[in-house]
Image (tube, rainbow, N blue to C red):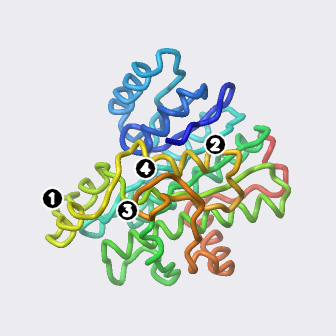
Amino acid sequence: MYEVPDQTGKLAVVTGANSGTGKEAAKRLAGAGARVILAVRTPGKGEHAAAEIRAAHPHAEVEVRRLDLADLSSVAAFAEALDGPLDLLLNNAGVMMLPTRMTSADGYELQLASNYLGPFALTVRLLPQLLAAPAPRVATMSSGTAAQGRINLDDLQSERGYRPVAAYAQSKLADLMLTLHLADLAATRGWPLLSAGAHPGYTRTNLMTAGPNAGGGRANLAMRISFRITPSQGVEQGAEPLLYAATSPDAVAGGYYGPRWGLVGPARKTKVYKRALDTAVRARLWSESERLTATPTPLGRAAAGR
């Protein structure tokens, strides 16, 4: 079991912290001494998670704030209300394999909006707070499914043809590209920020059922069988790659961490998928994301001041 180093004095934001890997990450960060903001879409569920964390760690400093990543006005309000410095941002929340094409509050395909555009806008908006910290980190959760993804900049919203797995894979490949491009920006602009990525392997969370069953849908037979027979692990193990990226002294900028045996196992550095290495596509995706979210990236080290 990965032991989170002492985080005393640090402020962390964990998205999707009311359940699954997000709640486990928040719990272990709080147990290591960090002050943790549980950024959740439903505050009531967040308060329940906070109570569980306090029960496990009576001295834990946890706070619940509302954040709907599928609503860019919610992202802007959350970022505006957060006073820096911010030491850790864990982009964990997401949805998976929605059976039909749904749209966000801003009219974007919902998997792309929740899994990528919302986290992108949140990360960029929080750069001033992050860069006010001495050694900030952004850890972003991708997925092994990203290996199958393709960034279709001519139909990023899957309007010409929606396929649940393809849309999910694109959104998670975009997350990995966010990780790598942010690491490049930090290096070229001299920011003291470490951007690293993670994937949870096959971890048992409600993500597996909530997405395919959304809107009255149901996972197809092949998917339901796959869920049952594929080697899997609990959230205690599944959260470790994200925690490693966020806190390990051995994590590196642009590093990608996942289970040792692909689907299960302790966290280790893993290979970045080939399509994520296309720097031209990464740059075009970043620029398009700035446009879609109306969130320009701060220039130079000026981001360190508000």
Type of residue at label 3?
Leu
Dot 2 or dot 4: first in sequence order is 4
- Asked if marks 1 and 4 touch (Cβ < 8 Å), the reply is no
Residue 185 appears left or right of 118: right
Dot 2 or dot 3: first in sequence order is 3
Q: Residues within 10 Å of mark 3 (few under 14, many from 20)?
A: many
Type of residue at label 2?
Thr
Type of residue at label 4?
Gly
Query: Pointer 1: what residue?
Result: 216
List x then y, in percent, for residue 244. Answer: 59, 48
Residue 78 appears left or right of 110: right
List x then y, in percent, for residue 174. Answer: 53, 68
Which residue is painted at 32% across and 77% down in the image?
Answer: 162
Dot 1 or dot 4: first in sequence order is 1
Query: Pointer 3: what residue?
Result: 110
Query: Pointer 2: what residue?
Result: 247
Residue 201 appears left or right of 241: left
Q: Nearer the viewer, mark 1 or mark 2?
A: 2
In the rendered image of this protein, does residue 204 appear above or below residue 227? Answer: above
Q: Pick the residue in front: 73 or 115.
A: 115
In the rendered image of this protein, does residue 171 appear above or below residue 11? Answer: below
Dot 1 or dot 3: first in sequence order is 3
Q: Which secondary structure lies at badge 3?
A: helix
**Marks 1 and 2, how far apart at CA:** 39 Å
Q: Which secondary structure lies at badge 2?
A: helix
**Marks 3 and 4, how far apart at CA:** 24 Å
- Asked if marks 2 and 4 touch (Cβ < 8 Å), the reply is no
Q: Which secondary structure lies at badge 4?
A: helix
Query: Pointer 4: what residue?
Result: 238
